Amino acid sequence: MSESVAITAKGLTKHFGDLTAVDSVDLEIPEAAIYGFLGPNGSGKSTAIRMLCGLLTPSSGEVEVLGYQVPGQAEQVKREIGYMTQKFSLYEDLTVAENLKFLATVYGVPGKELSKTIDGALERYWLNEQRHQFAATLSGGQKQRLALAGATLHRPRLLILDEPTSAVDPQSRRDFWDILFGLAEDGTTVLVSSHYMDEAERCHRLAILNKGRLVAEGRPRDLISEIDAGVVEIETSSPRAARDCLEGIDGVQSVAQLGARLHALTDKNLAEPAKLIREALNEAEVEAEVTAVTANLEDVFVVATRPNRKDGEPGHAA
């Protein structure tokens, strides 16, 4: 991953009337990295990304993208980006090759390079066999790869992906991410918003937004190791009774059920969180195996976006 910076944002803010969609966000995004945006619905992820790539004018703040100032030089930025939306937006009544030819023409690919560019995209995105197939007949994963091929025909320095894998199977998602890693290795900076924790863990860095504020930022492994909570796993044949018992205990922030297991998040300052939970369950006569475990990214997300979290406290899920 490059040490150079592709995007810098200071005090990035967007108001829609009385609604503040993005509130004083500071970011520094490395070049040639996959940078993820994670957050609940309505957290400001898409709004922030659109401002960063010059598609939406900020209400206030300073943004520099690929050496250009936004919004002043937004048109220059737009020529350097590829954009892929959640919804498939290419022409379903055109073939795969026809869609790519149309987009290459729009992007201004020279005529003498047209065939080579399209052939290269078909090869890179595993679409050779579908060259003459109408886009409407493609599977979800094939449509996804076609959309990505179209977004990168002009070799953009910055690629924007807005929840790109929401409608495809797990294997197609893994294949898609293999392609993204290849693009990053070739020097492309990738911004991606996602609701999938396994995808977020694949990013080089993450920004977690909540109610328009940046509440956590960093490498996934650092966010996990520096989580502001203890994590306790409970295995029991009575998960409902265990959960009812624990949700009222001082020091327990939240309890989530995962099959027959429960994940409890506890206050960071508790010396022995597993002991606290074990004693509470014993007193309630709930049989369980209780173990302190390492956090995962979902735990980080819950801690960073919990309702009682102090506003305006960005950092490592603190």
Image (cartoon, grey):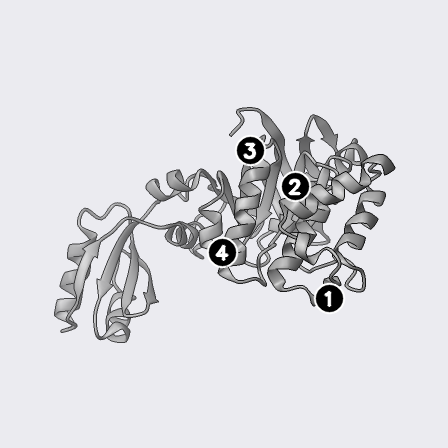
Mark pair 3, 4: CA separation: 23 Å
Tell which tag, 1 or 4, sits nearer the viewer.
Answer: 1
Work out whether mark 3 precedes mark 4 in sequence or the reverse, and give the earlier one: 3
Q: Which mark is residue 196?
A: 4
Residue closer to the observer: 204 or 299? 204
Q: Amino acid at mark 4?
A: Tyr
- Whichever of labels 2 and 3 marks the residue nearer the N terminus, that label is 2
As helix, strand or loop, the secondary structure at mark 1 comes to helix
Label 2, label 3: how far apart the Cα atoms are:
13 Å
CA separation in Å, label 2 and label 4: 19 Å
Image side of residue 92 versus residue 193, left or right: right
For residue 185, the mark is 3
Give the foreground label among 2 and 1.
1
In this rendering, would 253 be left or right of 96? left
Which image quadrant is residue 140 in? bottom right
* Residue 25 in view: no
User: Which numbered circle lies on residue 285?
Assistant: none
- 4 horizontally vs 234: left or right: right
